[in-house]
Amino acid sequence: MLEIKDLHTYYGNIHALKGISLEVEQGEVVSLIGSNGAGKTTTLRTIQGLLKPRQGKILFEGNSLESLSAQAIVRLGISQSPEGRLIFPRMTVQENLEMGAFSRRDAVGIKSDLEKALHLFPRLRERINQKGGTLSGGEQQMLAIARAMMARPRLLLLDEPSMGLAPMLVSQIFSIIRDINIQGTTILLVEQNARMALTVSHRGYVLQTGEIVLTGTAKDLQSNETVRKAYLGET
Ligand code: ATP
């Protein structure tokens, strides 16, 4: 579904992605793990068209994304829940969700997806008329994911969905991620919480200073000694 080949992205002279290649097949949850500054967010921003790669290819269902605008990429079926949430603080929960469907014209479909999102996140239904900025951190995270779902993506990009959440909420968010996948959405997941990410993923890639250093099934990575020491906090 998504195929990235030899991707190089720079910030000025900083060579942030040094030729990464990865694939996501339809129906998979694939995680991209790595420590701070490894290039995880940069990878997602490049896929989304927010950063232009200097070299390399990004193919989504056969379409080249490198020269498309971010909006055209959303229309092709890729949407993202960004790191740090970035919901609209002065809009209500409902308005935030409606904004997620900005590229769509099918009012009936939008209404039914809104219902699905509220079913997935009952907490948001309870707060439907509350302003986004007054939600708790965990609720804002849920809103950002639900808003991304409102674009009805075939590929959902999630950037650090567990960041800053209490442990109970972390398990809840990952269980919702699994549900979203089971209902048919393919997911590329960026996480520092490698342990949780691998429990919901089929496969994973380990990114280190702009390069993929390891890839395998989630099971392989969970039992890999380097991964265990560097990312799963084992000694
Ligand atoms: P984190 O988990 O801390 O968010 P990350 O793996 O997502 O890390 P990126 O944000 O992709 O890492 O950053 C990759 C590299 O690019 C880092 O060295 C970072 O300092 C650099 N970088 C990121 N954004 C910019 C920017 N706007 N200008 C210059 N350098 C940047």
Image (cartoon, rainbow, N blue to C red):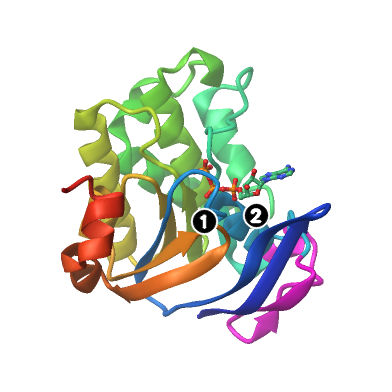
Q: Is residue 59 visible?
A: no
Residue picked out by circle 2: 45
Picture layout, residue 14 above or below residue 3: above
The front one of 55 and 61 is: 55
Q: Secondary structure at mark 1?
A: helix
Which amino acid lies under the numbered mark 2 shown in the image of this protein? Arg
Percent across and percent down for residue 120 are: 31, 43
Tell me where the magenta segment starts and ends, as one range: 53-73
Asked whether mark 2 lies closer than 8 Å to ligand 1, one says: yes
Decide if residue 132 is on the left or right side of residue 17.
left
Decide if residue 15 is on the left or right side of residue 185.
right
The front one of 15 and 130 is: 15
Crowding near the residue tagged with mark 2, few <14, some 14–19, many ≥20 C-alpha atoms within 10 Å: many
User: Is residue 60 within the magenta segment?
Assistant: yes
The residue at the point 36 percent across, 74 percent down is 215
Q: Which mark is residue 109?
A: 1
The residue at the point 49 percent across, 12 percent down is 134
Percent across and percent down for residue 19 are: 63, 74
